[in-house]
Image: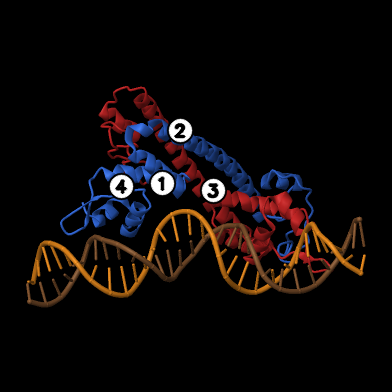
Chain colours: A blue, B red, C orange, D brown
Amino acid sequence: MRIGDLAEKSGLSTDTLRYYEKIGLLPKPLRDAGGRRVYDETILRWIDFLARLKSTGMGISKRQQYAELRAKGAASFTARRTMLEEHRQKVSDDIGALTEMLTVLDEKIDLYKRMEAGEPVDPAFENCARTEHGAPSGMKGRTDDNSTGPGSRADPET
Amino acid sequence: MRIGDLAEKSGLSTDTLRYYEKIGLLPKPLRDAGGRRVYDETILRWIDFLARLKSTGMGISKRQQYAELRAKGAASFTARRTMLEEHRQKVSDDIGALTEMLTVLDEKIDLYKRMEAGEPVDPAFENCARTEHGAPSGMKGRTDDNSTGPGSRADPET
DNA sequence: TTACAGGCTGGAGTGCACTCCAGGTCAAGA
DNA sequence: TCTTGACCTGGAGTGCACTCCAGCCTGTAA
């Protein structure tokens, strides 16, 4: 498999594949007689896992570190497991934060629906819907962000 | 409240607050006699929500768009709700992907533990442990890394 | 009155993660 | 043979999201 095929199969561009090789995320591949990179199908599994690490918030330097350990083989099993355990914790925390945000968004969306319908909104609930930060409400008098529209005293974003 | 106080309360630096103002995320505040920015407590709720949008993956341009709508007052309720509904979908999808990753990590961590203990690992199971069955979210059912480190035939990263 | 903390502006610099480009090589098909 | 397309390298450029800096101003406190 040449780099173009791998690009197609992995979803990464050839530039990105060469870049990943340069920074050590991908092992240096064999070359054919003409100097072109030749890849084995198995590299796809590694690229996939790298993509998953990335999409779940692991930055390049951590991935580099992991790739470096991987290159050491069995000697790095424990170190790799430790990294994965740390990442697991981060992923778990992120799920918690996102789940919380889902609630915040649901409340806010509901609030907007009711405002759109012209329903009067209880300021106490507004606070609750908007954030954990319980600041006293009372419209702030900024010309550009507040009470501008006809018929709106309460803006969910105030 | 001056910019230093707001920085302390919001967790953002004064530089970041001025930057957010410059790009339109924060409304232009009033100024005191000496030309210094003066903030009202209520801005904290908005900053908080912006932070939440950011930490849940909304980029600056989308936040700018939302802030622009917010500045329009009641006239933008529906547009804002639409943006929040789109973001809700994204957050929900992200939770799905992260949850899937949690399973992948758990299997991989378990695999490493067994390798560290010197347990022989059945290659078939290895694959199973690493692969997403059926690739639910856009990926093609490959979910593992693979390669040969020096000195191990059965490397979880292989 | 002077020291100094804090604030102001415009603009340059940073780190991440690519992405693009110029100028060249290689190999298969017309 | 010639053309074409894929590939090569080194290096420059991009977009995001800040972060830092120089040089200046203001207001309070010793």
Residue under pointer 2 = A82
* Front one among A152 and B6: B6
Is the residue at mark 3 from the same chain as the one at mark 2?
Answer: no
Choose top left, top right, bottom left or bottom right for residue B27.
bottom right
Left or right: D26, with B10 as reference point:
right
Numbered disc 1: secondary structure = helix
Label 4: how many residues lie within 10 Å, few (<14), some (14-19) or many (20+)?
some
Choose top left, top right, bottom left or bottom right for residue A50.
top left
Label 2: how many residues lie within 10 Å, few (<14), some (14-19) or many (20+)?
some
Q: Tell me, for residue B88, which label it has, or none.
A: 3
Subunit bearing disc 4: A
The amino acid pointed to by label 3 is Arg
Q: Tell me, for residue A64, which label it has, or none.
A: 1
| Residue A49 appears in the figure | yes
Q: Are marks 3 and 2 in contact (CB under 8 Å)?
A: no
Q: Which residue sits at x=71%, y=62%?
A: A145
Question: N-terminal of the two: label 4 or label 2?
Answer: 4
- Alpha carbon separation for disc pair 4 and 2: 22 Å
Could you say where residue B114 lies in the image, as x and y percent from the top left? 36, 24
Choose top left, top right, bottom left or bottom right for residue B70.
bottom right
Q: Tell me, for residue A27, which label it has, or none.
A: 4
- Alpha carbon separation for disc pair 4 and 3: 38 Å
Numbered disc 2: secondary structure = helix
- Alpha carbon separation for disc pair 2 and 1: 15 Å
Numbered disc 4: secondary structure = loop
